Structures are given as C-alpha cells and as structure tokens.
Image (tube, helix red, strand yellow):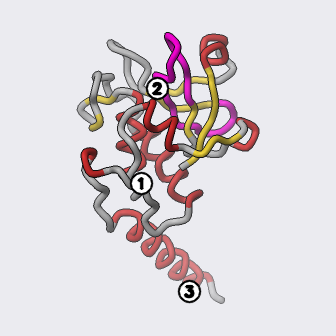
Amino acid sequence: MGGSARQFCVAALACAVLGGCSSHRAAAPEQAESYQLRRAPVSAVGEHAARTASSLVGSPYRYGGHSPDGFDCSGLVYYAYRAAGLSVPRTSTQQFRAAKPIPITAARAGDLLFFRYERKVSHVGIYLGDQRFVHAPSSGKHVSVASLTDAHYREHFVGAGRF
C-alpha cells in the first residue's frame, strides 16, 4: 500500500473510532443506574478519559463541579468518562463500588485510583501511567497531575479500579 493510501486508511480509521466515541449521549446523573460501555473497547475508553482529564489540567476546583467551569475529583472522572462515551456514577464512593478492583501493577491509562480520608473512600484520580494520575485535589487548587510516589498519596491509597 502506498504512502498516501496508508495515510487515508489511518485517517478513516481514526474518524470512525472518534466518531463512535462521541456519537452517544451519556445518561443524566439521575438516570445513570446502569453503567454501560458504548461502542469503543474498554482500553480505548480509558485512554480517551485519561486524555480528556489531562487536557483539563489547570481547571479550577469546585465542590460538586463536573464541568470545565470547575471540578471536584469525582466530577472530573464523571466528565472524562462521559466524554469517552461511558456513563459512570457521580461520586467517588459510588465509583469505588462500581469499578472492578485491579492490582496497581495492572493499572493502565484511564483506570481509577482511590484514596481514603476520614474512614471512607472520598478521593479519586485517573491513572496516566508511570505512577502519575490526574485529579482535582481540593478547594482553592486546580486540576493537576500527582504521583503515587508522593508519601501523602501512598499513605491514603486504597486501590485501583477499572470500568
């Protein structure tokens, strides 16, 4: 296959995949009782969610926020996965319960990392690879990238999960 024909095939495949990811509207939060994948394979959805979340670095933290105007940690996950075509629960506790637990050694881009504060899972981030994750940390801060090598996050880490 010639160079231009190969480029055309790659471009057509990319359009088909991206079109499939964005062609479905995710359920509203109050209707999101059944969380299901829409079209794309799981790894593609997780990677898309990780890219979306990474593109939002610098967005402000806002308690209860789930839009680029402001995010809390679970709102960032909710928004990134909706952009990837997957309806997920809205809160970190619900996300923890709905995600399939995986060993951290098996984590890949788009998997969720859960953290416990004050006896309950109350923080979540999206794994990027190489021990890094993107999250909306807390009031007064912005969406940022952090590392599991940081003592604070290691101390509060409770597990990883996958949708």
Q: Give left or right: position of 155 versus 96.
A: right
Residue at (63, 25) in percent of width and height: 158
Element at badge 3?
A: helix
User: Residue 144 — which label?
Assistant: 2
Q: CA distance from mark 2 to mark 1?
A: 27 Å
Q: Position of residue 65 (x, y in %)?
A: 27, 30
| Viewer-nearest residue: 66 or 50 | 66
Q: Quadrant of residue 114?
A: top right
Residue farthest bottom in this picture: 1
Q: What x and y, as percent, mark residue 112?
A: 55, 38
Q: For the stretch drawn in magenta, what is the main secondary structure?
A: strand
Which residue type carries mark 3? Ala
Front: mark 2 or 1: 1
Query: Which residue is located at x 55 percent, y 45 percent?
Result: 110
Residue type (three-letter) at the residue carrying disc 2: Ser
Q: Is residue 7 above or below residue 54?
A: below
Labels 3, 2: front one: 2
Q: Quadrant of the N terminus?
A: bottom right
Instruction: Return the mark for residue 5.
Output: 3
Local packing at callout 2 (Cα closer than 10 Å; few below 14, some 14-19, many 20+) is some
Q: Can you tell which mark lies on residue 35?
A: 1
The numbered mark, 2 or 1, whose residue comes first in the sequence reads 1
Residue occupying the point 35% across, 63% down: 22
**Contact flag, marks 3 and 2 (Cβ < 8 Å):** no
Residue in the foreground of this view, choosing between 54 and 115: 115
Q: Give residue 135's position: percent from left, percent from top.
A: 47, 28
- First reached walking from the N terminus: tag 3 or tag 2: 3
Q: CA distance from mark 3 to mark 1?
A: 39 Å
Which region of the structure is painted magenta? 114-131
Residue drawn 72% across the image and 38% down it: 103
